[in-house]
Structures are given as structure tokens and as C-alpha cells.
Amino acid sequence: MLSFIARRLAVAIPTLLILVVLSFVLMYAAPGGPFNSERPLPPAVLANIEAKYGLDQPFWKQIANYVVGVVTQFDFGPSFQYKDRSVNDIIAQGFPVTLTYGAWSFVVAAVVGISLGAAAAIKQNSWLDYMAVGFTIGAQVLPNFVMAPILVLIFTLWLGWLPGGGWNGGQWENLILPVIALSTSYMASIARITRSSMLEVLNTNFIRTAQAKGLSPSRVIFRHALKPAMLPVLSYLGPTFVFMITGSVVIDIFFSTGGIGRFFVDSAFNRDYSVIMGITILVGSMTILFNLLVDVLYAWIDPKIRY
Amino acid sequence: MLPHAKDVESVGEAMQLAEVQGRSLWADARTRFFRNKAAVFGLILLVCVAIFAIFGGFFTQYERDVVDFSLMGANAYKGVPSFETGHYFGTDASGRDLYARIVQGTAISIMVGVVGATVAVIVGTLYGATAGYFGGRVDGIMMRTVDVLMSIPFMFVLILMLVIFGRSMFMLFLGIGLISWLDMARIARGQTLTIKNKEFVEVAHAIGVHPLKIILRHIVPNLLGIVAVYATLLVPQLIIFESFISFLGLGVQEPNTSLGALLSEGASNMFNGTIWQLQFPLIAFVFTIFAFFFVGDGLRDALDPKDR
């Protein structure tokens, strides 16, 4: 097991380095520096500013400094647009918000999706099953940027039950709509995967044996069927978590929740490269970490996997 | 005992008859596809959406990028959808005809999806088939590369690229092309691994056919079924992806538009009482995505032997 994790890490760490180098090269290749404003600065001032941000050094030295800063101190450098803030300050401000509603959406999508899918498979061809299948088909066309306006239209504009935006320190009224908007389409995918893998497992011989020896239906499902049926779901959960973080871009714009997505898009329009890079690398490392976690869990649950 | 000439004839006739009734894999798949109601519904819907996107522009007197200044700022009560004014779907906040804009938005969204899927089919199939056919170390390196690329959050990298190299259709296509082939490569490789052990590939190898020719002539044609299925299912995913980018204002730029950009506009004007600005793009979006999903699911049921 340890060697399996070590081998996975041996792939994960170079991946992360590639991501850091790739985004740095992209930034370096960008036409025009971050300080090319409409009114050209005097050359002496420009040289001073560039020296402050280390932009006057040769390419290899810049990239080495950046990589060393990121790897050893998690230091993403200063923001190019907000003079008095570093990228770390911006991430420290926005990331807890993103993580709060992202984690909630993840939990809601996983718990509701798995229960719905499993229930639909157990009661195949019942009204519950048809409802679940209908939901999974319908929700395919409801990605977060479609869900968000529809929810606000219904619950804010027509019914007036919930606020259409704002964060308010994470009050539940402000949390509900973002969480539903973010989780719906993934909930549907999780339900669909759970249903089909559960159906497959319920038709296997070992389940028939368990039933034949007189175990109660709930024991058959919870002790025997659920664990193998979870495997395909598990491998979908890794990417889902990443989509939650990516979706924060839409949620932050639409609901003004103030997470990292807002800063990401703002910096995209302001050409604030260091912030974009910092957030890209942060999300990238979380992606890689999460995929690693899912792989390890997978190997732990599935006895067929040799490591 | 010699067989009678008459018997031989009848056997010949029977064989001819059998030949006529013989069904190829594709004919079989076609029958299965057309027996599937959801798939046929999806196909009809898809044809309707395509006709709308291609010929929809002929049914209106308005241009998509002409601003009607008499409606600007007053579209909440003057730009209401109606057949009398000819603005079937109403107008947007700048007084442009929404019907004409949705026609163009649908066309661009479908184009992005189809071009992305085509890139995926060409690059992904060749890449996957090559990796699978050669196997061993080549396979290891090639697929490890795909693994590494897959664990990069491409949404963010694409936005980074759009910011750095400027927002343009070309960058959008390039970015979507860069990501779309990864899944296809995995699928093609998996399929190739089973095909390459079949006798006809062995024979081709034994008589000294060049590996490249084996891949192109013998392996790729046998991949086409599964590739077609996943390409059809990839199109709606790419449309959603593009809409996501355009929703943020980073994708297709004015005066051009796509469904994502129209949805974003509709959503931001929601509180001004112009609900049709959200409603009609939403309907177009839902129909387009549904059509592709249903056709793709139908194709999968018809062609993919695994799920039968």
C-alpha cells in the first residue's frame, strides 16, 4: 500500500510542477507586461517597478524564484493590480467562502445522489425509479449557470423566499441557492452512475447467495451490495469536487458570494497574471490531491486492484 | 450420388435469399436505433434545431447586429415578443432582435461543439490507437502523458490562455480542442487493446503490413462505432463548456454571440422585467443539449455491445 501511494505521488508531483511551469511560461509569453497602461510610464519608473517585482531578471531566474517561492513557502508573489495585497491575501480572503459552499454542494450531491440512485435500483420499475430516471435525464441540461438564474427567478423574484445573492458570513439563507445551483447536475450524474452499478451488483451471484441464505433485505444491501456498487461512483467523486471549485466562478459572479471565482474572473479582465496563476495552481494542486485520495480509497476498497 | 440439378438450383436460390436477408452490423444498429423512441425523438429534435440554426435567419426581417435606437432602454414594454412587430422573441437591452441573435447563438454553439468533437475524433482516435497497438513502453509513456494532462484543471488554463492571447474564436477552438481529445484517446486505446489480438490484425502483421497501415486500415475502422457514440455525447458537453466560458464573458465576443452569452445577458436583465431574454435562449439551449444527448444515448444503445 505504501509503495502504491509513493508511486502515485511520483506521478502527482511532476504533474504539479508541469502545471506551475506551464502557467508561468504562458504568463511570460504574454504580449505586453502587466504595467503597460494607456498612459506610458517614464522608463525610469517602469524600470523601478519591474525591479521591485523581479521582472528585470532573466527568464530562468524568474521562473526559478517563482517555483521555489511556491514550493517552499506557498508564496504566490504580489498581486500586479492591487498594490498593497499579495496573491496569498486574496486567496486567504476568497478561498474559505468557496470551500464552504463547495463542500456543502459536494456533500449534498453525493448523499442525495447516492441515496436516490440506490433507492431507484432497489425498487426498479417503481414510480420512485421512474422519477429518479426522469430527474437524471432532465438535470443533464441544468448546469450551474442555467440553474442559478432559474432558481433566482423562482425563489427570489417570484416567491421572494430567499435572497438572490450576497454572502452575509455564510448564513443558511445565502447558502441554499448556491448549493442547489452547484450540486444539481452532479447529483444527477451520481444518481445515474449509482443506479446502474447497483443494478449490476444486485444481479450478481453473491447477492443471490446472500438472499438465498435468508439475510434480511437491508442487510443484503448495506453489508454486501453497497460497497462494490460504490466503486464507479467513487471514481466520479474526484472530478466532481474539482467541478465544484470550477463552478465557483459562476456562483461567485451570479450570487456575489465573494469566493475565489470572483477574483479569478476579475483578474482575468484586469490581466492580473499573478492572481490567475496563483488560483490556477491552487485548484490544480487540489485536483491532483483529490485524484490521489480517490485512487488510494479505490485501492483500499476494491480487493481486485493489485498495487 | 450426384445431386440433382434442380436441388442445386434451389440451394443456390436459398443462398441468394439468405444473402439478401443477411444483416450487417450497421443495419442491425440502425434497426435498434429507430426502435428506440427517445433516440428518434432526439433525432427529429436535432434536425429541427439544425434547420433553425441554418435557415432561421431567412424568416425575419431583422439583422442580428442592428441596434434599434427607438427600443433601446425601453425594451421592457416596447420590445415584448410579438408577431406584429416581427420581433418573435422580443428584443434585447440594446434593441437588437432576439430571434436573429438566438439563431446565430445556436449556430455558433453547435459549431463549437461539432468542431471540438471532430478534433477529438481525429487526434484522440489516432493517438489512442497508436498507443494501444504498440503497447509496452510506448503505451506507458503516451497514456501517462494523457493522465498528467487530465489532472490539470483545464477550465482555468483555458481562461488563462484567453486572457493572455486575447479573447477570440480561434483561441476558444484551440482551447477546447486541447482538452476534448483526452477522453477519446483513452476509449480508443481500450478498444484497440481488444482488437489488436484478433486474427485479421495478426495476419496483416504476419504478411508484413506496415504498422501505420495496420492502424489506419484495420484498427481505426473497427473503432468507428464506439468513437461515433462518444463523439455525439461529447458535442453537448463541449456546448455546455463553451456556454460556461461565454457566460463569464470570456468566450464569444460581441457582436457575435453564443447561447452562453445570451443566457448571461438574459440572467443579468432578469430584474428589469424582460423575462423573454432569459426564457428563449434557455429553451434553445435545453433543446439543443437534449437533442444531442438523446441521439448519443440512442447510438450507444445501438452500437455499444457492452450495454446490451
Image (spheres, helix red, strand yellow):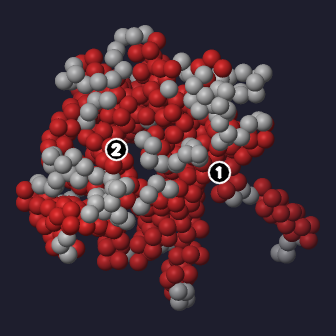
In this view of the protein, can residue B154 be seen by the observer? Answer: no
Q: Which residue is mark 2?
A: A265
**Amino acid, disc 1:** Ala
Q: Picture coordinates of residue B68 (x, y %)?
A: 67, 32
Q: With respect to residue A71, does B276 lie above or below? A: above
> Which residue occupies the extreme right position in the image?
B6
Q: With respect to residue A259, does B172 lie above or below? A: below
Chain containing mark 2: A
Q: Is residue B296 left or right of residue A85?
A: right
Residue B148, quarter of the rendered image: bottom left
Residues under numbered marks 2 and 1 in contact, where contact means CB atoms less than 8 Å apart: no
The residue positioned 47% from the left and 59% from the top of the image is: B171
Q: With respect to residue B219, does B121 lie above or below? A: above
Circle 1: element type? helix
Measure how far apart labels 2 and 1 are at the Cα level. 46 Å
> Which residue occupies the extreme left position in the image?
A73
**Amino acid, disc 2:** Val
Circle 2: element type? helix
Q: Is residue B283 left or right of residue A240?
A: right
The residue positioned 50% from the left and 26% from the top of the image is: B269
Q: Which residue is mark 1?
A: B29
> Which residue occupies the extreme bottom position in the image?
B208
Chain containing mark 1: B
Q: Quarter of the image containing the N terminus of chain A?
A: bottom left
Q: Nearer the viewer, residue B289 or B86?
A: B86
The residue positioned 25% from the left and 67% from the top of the image is: A43
The residue positioned 23% from the left and 53% from the top of the image is: A80
